[in-house]
Image: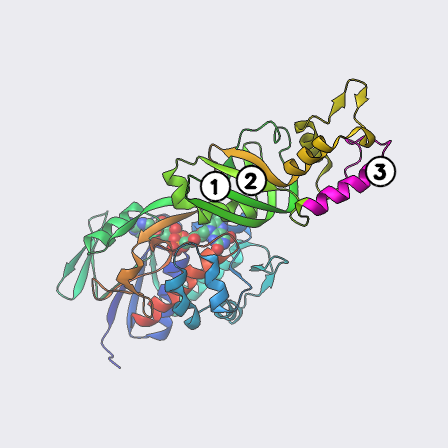
Amino acid sequence: MSTKALNVVVIGGGAAGFFGAIACAESHPYARVTLLEAARKPLTKVEISGGGRCNVTHACFDPSLLVQHYPRGSKALRGAFTRFQAKDTIAWFECRGVQLKTEADGRMFPVTDDSATIVNCLMQSAIDAGVQLRVGAAVKSVMRSGTTFQVQLKSGEVLEADRLLLATGSSPVGYAIAQSLGHSITPPVPSLFTFTIRDSRLQNLAGVSVNSVHLRLQIGEKTCLEQTGPLLITHWGLSGPAVLKLSAWGARDLHDSHYQATLIINWLPQYNLETLRQDLLKVKSQLAKRTIAASCPVPIPRRLWERLIEQVGIGEGSSGPVRWAELSNKTLNALVQELTRGQYRVSGKGAFKEEFVTCGGVNLKEVDFKTMESRCCPSLYFAGEILDIDGVTGGFNFQSAWTTGWLAGQAMG
Ligand SMILES: Cc1cc2nc3c(=O)[nH]c(=O)nc-3n(C[C@H](O)[C@H](O)[C@H](O)COP(=O)(O)OP(=O)(O)OC[C@H]3O[C@@H](n4cnc5c(N)ncnc54)[C@H](O)[C@@H]3O)c2cc1C
């Protein structure tokens, strides 16, 4: 092992940059690691993540299952997760005194429910490892000079680096630096967003949620995506894990279609058409004298039920609210269709403040995922969101940042 001091420069003080810098400084004591962050404060996304609680990772410990949560990057991450996966993330934080807990849906948070716990842990670990953190240090460009790099700051200062880790997230400057060093960039587009839907069936129902719906998203002629999970009605349309996952899997096609698509909602995935029809027929004979609006026989919120029956014309009849006995077979069939195959027009992309990532970035074929080193430019490394990798919501985006950061840190010595 060489004992010559090695100048390692990490650009980007986010999750991936911190993990890379700490891993490098801890495993290579002869490396002088400098971490450059453009903002006045590092780790701002970690701080606001998970609604201020930081969804650190996901309780999924089989790399082959873990990769299934990445619309882009799953193949490249397969090997990377065999080297550093969610279990390793838990152990990494645990041995630094941070305990994580698992919620019912598999998401993992610090037991304090406070992202400051994660921010403080990363800051302290960087200090302990001897990482030199510089804030307000925006990098403008990087030049290759022989086997080293000249890192030019906006201030005019130039730093020399033997190894360079680019962990600039979705920053355009980061993409430009990667391109200037020979890389191609898959055009960045947003992922993890809500759907804008203007539809009378959803009006004034903001805040109503359903635990499990089945969604089918038709984008143009070719793309049809499906998801089952919780759904939330918002002021502007639909949100919740099932919608966010669809937005991730369909991110590029939705962008190309200008966010125009058709969403088919099955509010009752636990039934099929026939079992639902039979159940409603039973209700019709058992509750014949009761009004349909007042007796919702299926597990959806009452206000939603009232809106859906209105849609098929069962709200008020000429002699007051319609009773079950008055329900014709034709209307019953229409109700079954509405409950299981309602069509909604997606007309745009909403803003989602809980989590938002970029699909696109450095072309994965140009990176060796054993080390995260560039295949185009020796001694250049990548980690985190700058890569063309993104996961669905649930802690997967941080997990890929921890993994790629850690691998790069190990390899840069
Ligand atoms: C609101 C919100 C909540 C989220 N919640 C979660 C969650 O709970 N769980 C989860 O898994 N994911 C979550 N994500 C996604 C997650 O935050 C990102 O995937 C992750 O932060 C990516 O880490 P990164 O280090 O690659 O990039 P970033 O966190 O974006 O860090 C990049 C850093 O580089 C710096 N930088 C950029 N350009 C330069 C330059 N030229 N010179 C110097 N510095 C530069 C930036 O200022 C930034 O600090 C959330 C995202 C958002 C927006």
Residue reaching furthest to the left: 146
- Is 149 left or right of 210, judged from the image as shown? left
Of callouts 2 and 1, the N-terminal one: 1
- At numbered mark 3, what does the secondary structure look like: helix, strand or loop? helix
Whether residue 42 is visible: no
In the depicted structure, whether residue 194 falls above or below residue 198? below
Would you name the residue on which mark 3 appears?
A: 285
Residue drawn at 26 percent across, 82 percent down: 1
State which tag comes first along the sequence, 3 or 1.
1
The residue that label 1 is drawn on is 218
The three-letter code of the residue at mark 2 reads Ile
Q: Point out which mark residue 304 bears.
A: none
Which residue reaches farthest bottom?
1
Q: Residue at x 39, y 35 (%)?
A: 258
Label 2 to label 1: alpha-carbon separation? 8 Å
Which sits earlier in the primary sequence, circle 2 or circle 3? 2
Q: Quadrant of residue 388?
A: bottom left
Q: Position of residue 4 (x, y in %)?
A: 22, 76
- CB within 8 Å, label 2 to label 1: yes
Label 2, on which residue? 264
Is residue 185 placed above or below 121 in the rendered structure?
above
Q: CA distance from mark 3 to mark 1?
A: 37 Å
Q: Secondary structure at mark 1?
A: strand
**Amino acid on which the number 3 mark rests in the picture:** Ser
Label 3 or label 1, whichever lies nearer to me, is: 3
Q: Would residue 53 be seen by someone viewing this image from the given angle?
A: yes
Q: Position of residue 323 (x, y in %)?
A: 81, 29
Residues rendered magenta in the picture: 274-297
Q: How many marks?
A: 3
